[in-house]
Amino acid sequence: MVKLHEQILRDAHQSMLATRMRTEDMLPIAKKLDEVGYFSLEVWGGATFDVCIRYLNEDPWVRLNKLKEAIPNTPLQMLERAMNIVAYWNFPDDVVKKFCFFAKKNGCDYFRIFDALNDLRNMETPMKAVKEAGGHVQACMSYTISPVHTVEYFVERFEKLVKMGADTLCIKDMAGMISPQRAYDIVKGCKDAGIKLEIDLHTHCTSGMTGMAYQRAADAGVDILDTDISAISGGTAAPPTESVVAAFKDTPWDTGYDLELLIEIRKYFLKVWDKYRHLHRFNALKFDPSVTLHQIPGGMLSNLIFQLEEQGAHDKYRDILDETARVREELGYPPLVTPSSQVVGVQAVMNVLHGRYKVITKETKDYCRGMYGKSPAPIKPEIMKKILGPKWKDEVIDCRPSDLIKPMWDKSKSKLNEIDGGSLIKKEEDIMTYILFPQVGLKFLKGEAKAEFTSAQLPLPIENPLTRAMVKQSFPEYKQLWIDHLKTEWGLLKSQQNLKLRLMVNLTK
Ligand code: CO
């Protein structure tokens, strides 16, 4: 039997709908989701915390509470970025511990903990804190392809995570590039090494190989697979839940889930998918097997293209891809995931635009200093010298990065207390919101945040600029087509009798 870890309420909409799904989209279907019998439902963490306060004017703590109330039987899970928690920089131990405590208290049962560099020192504090709070630790290894990331590399580290107190293990393939054979070898390697903990495979469909990888992982004895209800699945998201359930029916891996119930849930999420149609991107729905060559995750690729367009240098796209691979190698093959993907990506852009390591970002320097943790492979001295200067050895830290950060909780609490006579703190969790996102969090707590849209405004009408942008990305020739058309049909337009035509014209503005 294989169990499924449902991602529809977190990773699916983070991958396909810019993380914009609201609590009010989740609650009406909560009871049905709870009836499926999933291993766990991923509902929190990752980018959801940031997006809640930044774009939705929603309190993420309230979301967690409400979901727990609506889903009493299925364990709820969050994605926790080790010492970065749900943000993009390191926090001190006291904040990480408090966060895990509050998350558990508000309804999170399982904590999927990962470190971008697989530096296990960064995972110790959150793992301990979750255990102390009575939570379940799902310890991850970020998956990537490189000469150092061998099957043995993963198996050895999983063995260490077992010793560190993990409850279950997870291969976290955030770029969606694991091959069927690799999935088989790592799972089999763990089982052969005598690891008894259940193993979960998290991946995305990006490479197009994921369905095959799931079968091979099942052959090797994988215990849990990550899926998204089909309405928001495939492409840069995970494989569809119903398809995996159907594929394993009447086999040794039969999930035993009710396919009809899942199809009902699918129908509900098709409406949610339509509600956010201005966020649909056809490219995100497509497979992109080139990820197996350059190892750059889909989200990072679109960021790179955006950066290049901003700099007026989109003709450099190919060079940037090659340079990203080269910089990644020189920096010791970090898996490309937040925040290491930003370090490597931005430096690669700089190298192409200004010459190799002529402009070096603060983030690249910090990375080489060890401020993100230890790089998977050592960085060559000549690269260190280029980036940190001739005395590079004096700048490199040997300790865990968070050891250098002073405790923050009490200080931040008093600081927040001083603002508006302490009236902003309605509950202790509000202090955490402020610590995690000082500016956006403060604005949110002050009640000054505004939701970009309300549910009543969604789906956006066709003449909204965001909907128009969505259509245009698929039909770049659209504008010219209609200009040509108008020239011949000018009379028709002038009389303004053809409503459909007018609507189409509006679209091209
Ligand atoms: Co993911």
Image (cartoon, rainbow, N blue to C red):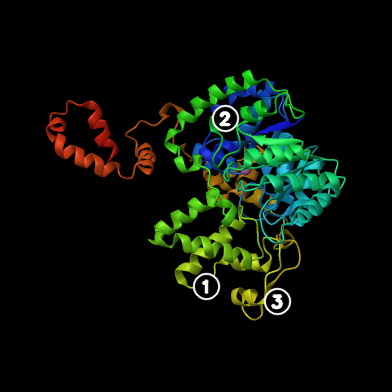
Q: Is residue 507 left or right of residue 211?
A: left
Q: Is residue 495 above or below residue 286?
A: above
Rendering quadrant holding ligand 1: top right
Secondary structure of residue under mark 1: loop
Q: Which residue is mark 2?
A: 230
Mark 2, Cα crowd under 10 Å, few <14 / some 14-19 / many 20+, is many
Which numbered mark, 3 or 2, is in the foreground of this view?
2
- What percent of the width, then of the height, locates residue 23? 57, 30
Residue type at tag 2: Ser
Quadrant for the N terminus in the image = top right
* Residue 484 screen position, x and y as percent: 20, 41
In this rendering, the answer to whether 272 lies above or below 412 is above
Mark whose residue sits in front, 2 or 1: 2
Q: Quadrant of the C terminus?
A: top left
As rendered, which of 222 and 118 lies closer to the eye?
Answer: 222
Q: In the rendered view, would you say 459 is above or below 472?
A: above
Image spot of residue 275 (x, y percent): 46, 29
**Apparent side of residue 164 relative to residue 293 in the rendered image (left or right):** right
- The kind of residue on which mark 1 rests is Arg
Name the element at disc 3: helix
Which residue is labeled 3 in the image? 394
* C-alpha span from label 2 to label 1: 44 Å
- Residue 447 appears anywhere in the view: no
Q: Which residue sits at x=58%, y=46%? A: 207
Q: Amino acid at mark 3?
A: Asp
Please tell me how crowded label 3 is: few (under 14), some (14-19), or many (20+) other residues with Cα within 10 Å.
few
Mark toward the start of the polypeptide (3 vs 2): 2
Q: Residues within 10 Å of mark 1 (few under 14, many from 20)?
A: some
Q: CA distance from mark 3 to mark 1?
A: 23 Å
Question: Is label 2 in a helix, a strand or a loop?
Answer: helix
